[in-house]
Amino acid sequence: MTDSAVQNDANTAAQAAAIRAVLGHRSLVLVGMMGVGKSSIGRRLAARLGIPFVDADTEIEKAAGMSIPDIFARHGEGDFRSGEARVIARLLDAGPQVLATGGGAVMNEGTRVAIKSKGVSVWLSAEFDVLMRRISKRKNDRPMLHTPDPAETLRQLLKLRDPFYALSDVSVQSREGPHEAIVNEIVAALAAFLNVSVPPQPKEGA
């Protein structure tokens, strides 16, 4: 490994430690529409920062003992949203962590208040075309889009939800390309928001 690579690794580790220190017990809460990559990017972000990754949807399925599509089919969206709010409230007490939330989670006022109190919110946004390409690969997993016109449904959901996503502390655009680049942007945005600077690293041999 070259000296510059060693220095980069040291700076990355120092920045992660500084962000963890400022976060304390707060969670980094990823919000945004289905298909933006909250889970895949969230796992990489958690690894970068050295904190756990938790997916709220996975925890909801564990608590309910069934998949999210099955919850929607058997109990309806109302019951799902109530359960979602309870699970997220519980998870927020377990920080620090990177917590990926479902696309509609922030529509609940209580959830927004809890995230503001116990977390730092990160909005992962994406262009409509990017979302449609990604979502079309997993249509069966998206009960909100089980409609005659999924594209129009997505447009309406974006129109409804974007103003709430925009209340987030930090915003980063998800796009096609290496997830690591997006993680870098999130870390930089978090460092700026939290007023974190990378401590100077001692030179080798000093």
Image (cartoon, rainbow, N blue to C red):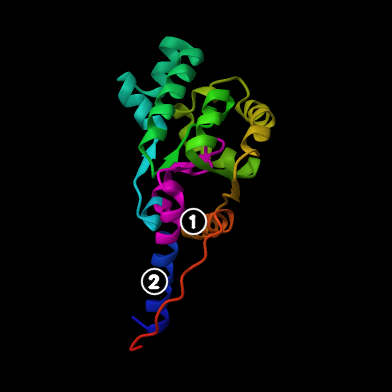
> Considering the numbered disc 2 on the image, is that residue within a helix, a strand or a loop?
helix
Q: Amino acid at mark 1?
A: Val
Between 22 and 5, the residue placed more toward the observer is: 22
Q: Nearer the viewer, mark 2 or mark 1?
A: 2
Q: Residues within 10 Å of mark 1 (few under 14, many from 20)?
A: many
Q: As drawn, is 38 to the left or to the right of 96?
A: right
Q: Residue furthest bottom?
A: 205
Whole-angstrom CA distance, mark 2 to mark 1, is 15 Å
Badge 2 vs badge 1, beta-carbon distance below 8 Å: no
Q: Quadrant of the N terminus?
A: bottom left
The residue indicated by pointer 2 is 9
> Bounds of the magenta span?
17-45
The residue indicated by pointer 1 is 183
Query: Where does residue 14 sit, x and y in percent of width and height?
Result: 41, 66
Please state the total of marks drawn on the protein image.
2
Query: Where does residue 165 sit, x and y in percent of width and height?
Result: 62, 37
Q: Quadrant of the C terminus?
A: bottom left
Please name the residue shown 50% across and 57% down the image. Answer: 187
Looking at the image, is mark 2 or mark 1 earlier in the sequence? Answer: 2
**Residue 25 magenta-highlighted:** yes
Residue 108 showing in the rendered view: no
> Where, by quadrant of the figure, is residue 88 drawn?
top left
**Residue 5 magenta-highlighted:** no
